[in-house]
Image (tube, coloured by chain):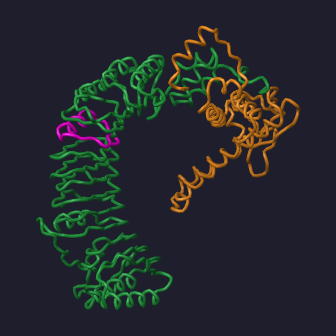
Amino acid sequence: MASAGESGDGADGKGVTTITIISSDNEAFEVLEAAASMSLTIRHLIEDGCADGGIPLPNVTAGILAKVLEYCSKHVAAVAASSEAGSSSNAADAAAAPEKEEDLASFDKAFIDVEQDTLYDLLMAANYLEVKGLLDLACQKVADMIKGKTPDAIRQTFKIKNDFSPEQEEKIREENQWAFE
Amino acid sequence: MGRDGMDAFPEGVVQHILSQVSNARDVAACAGVSRCWRDCVPFLPSLYFPRGAFDAAGGGAGAAADDAIGRMVGAAARLEELVVYCPFSTALLPKWLAARSPTLRVLELRVDSADADKWDHLDCIGLAAGLEELRLWGLTMTRAPAWRRMERLRVLEIVGAVLQDTAVNGAVAACPNLTDLALLGCECSGEAVISLALLDRCRLDFVGSGNRSLRLAAPRVESLEVQGFSWISLRGGDRLKQLTISKNTGSLYHVEMGKLPELEQLSLRGVQWSWGAIRSVLQCSSEVKHLVMKVEFCGDFDTLQPFPEVDLVEFFNSHPKLRKFEIHGAMFAALCQKNSLKNLDSRFVMPCLEEVLVTVRSPLNAEQKLNTLESLVRYSVMLRRMVIRISQMKNCHEASDDFFEDICKFMYMNSGRVCIE
């Protein structure tokens, strides 16, 4: 099984492997293999030796792919830094760990603060590419948009069709009167 | 893609999104959005009924709450976490818990302590055999609960309760595998006997009049905070890293414990401790790095007394790892040199001391206090910062003015390291 590095996908002189990923609109992105592997889908493709010449993703456009890879790169760097700090006996490193967690949290917060359409696209991409952290982040953001809204308002915000029959509608309204008085 | 709205989302994604919604009002709203959403609701892992959830129903709030909680809990087939802060009928609790016992892991209830007999219904908590975390607010426990062994329970918190000591002991004994125990703002008197092999963190804050004693056996405990006991016995401090013992009213007259080899932080607080108790704790804490001592008075009986003198050199020699040292009022006043510095071994040093906070309350024995401050600075090679608090100094006459002047001089001579608040 050829590893991505050996296939000439771009192992640079430092021995760090990179992978090329190609969006649905044919834009190529070169990223660290470790970052790309945050996507289980991509990781399986690499392991199956399908990474030669780049991994095509017919479901993800360049704009969204760029964002997903930005998320992965940031998070994989953070994981590497924290495992260094964990094994280091340097007290300063250990003390810096909660700060770095805060940095990551504010990165996430700013990262997911996007328009609704972009949010959906990120969510679907994270789901398809199986990037758990990003999927959780995007789902939480959508959930936050649900909070405090009436069913009508939720339907409007997310453009969802009301497919209840009038009788079902009535029953639901009765049961949940306490929530919307 | 997003232009089509969420209807285009695969159901697994909708499920994942809705799993992040737990506020009961929001869950009720979601159930009314569309069939797909309604079908997801039974799989939600967590339901939270806030305090005012049913306030809008006015006089019918109680019935509305019982109805809605019963319906929603009944429908949530995979419910793992249930939090109820709004008023509800405890008589219905057995039914709700029995229905969800296979999946329920976390339970948090606010119980109205007005009706003492409601505790019988809280026996039913034992039905939720898989419970891992239990938090109860405002209950009254006059007897030990009839729980079976709650083998899976790891976290138990009871806040603002009125408890009989037999009830406390019985409840804790029914949960042998606790790692976290917190009994806060609890009115209780008598003897608390707690033995927990897996306990990591423990906070006991017992209030009210009457004497209380604590027998705690916890071989793995790492963090322990107790307030309100006059008599304390601790077995198993081998892993203890943080220890705070306080007695906000009344007096603490006995502490027994073994050596605390891993102790890093120690805090002694209260109105009155017996000297034997203080000495006992300090003797077991030779490894301590961060020490706070804030006890107002000494004395073995009801009479409040000042502290016996504590030799500075001996004190720091027995606690060589001290990095941060905080000492207040009368206890600071007791530190002195007992002539030991005159014959001092020139190698005496406080090797690790970096930060000191001293509160000075009165100008009595000013010379001794200044000597102590000077010694602290002179013999601590690593000292970065000393803060002297004098804003609450009693006794407004000349002696205090002189003392204040002397302290200011001391500060200027050590500028950069010493400051006054």
Chain B's colour is green
Q: Position of residue B3 (x, y in %)?
A: 79, 26
Residue depicted at 65% across the width and 36% down the height: A141
User: What chain is colored orange?
Assistant: A
Q: Position of residue B68 (x, y in %)?
A: 45, 21
Q: Is residue B167 magenta?
A: yes
Residue depicted at 40% across the width and 70% down the height: B323
- Range of residues picked out in magenta: B158-181
Image side of residue A15 versus residue B307, left or right = right
**Closer-to-camera residue (B220/A9):** B220
**Closer-to-camera residue (B413/A176):** A176
Compared to B357, does B167 lie above or below?
above
Q: Position of residue B146 (x, y in %)?
A: 22, 27
Q: Position of residue B34 (x, y in %)?
A: 64, 17
Q: Is residue A13 magenta?
A: no
**Closer-to-camera residue (B197/B15):** B15
Q: Is residue B174 visible?
A: yes
Dividing the picture into quadrants, the one containing residue A144 is: top right
Residue depicted at 20% across the width and 67% down the height: B279
Image side of residue B212 versus residue B70, left or right = left
**Residue located farthest toward the front when viewing the structure as drawn:** B59
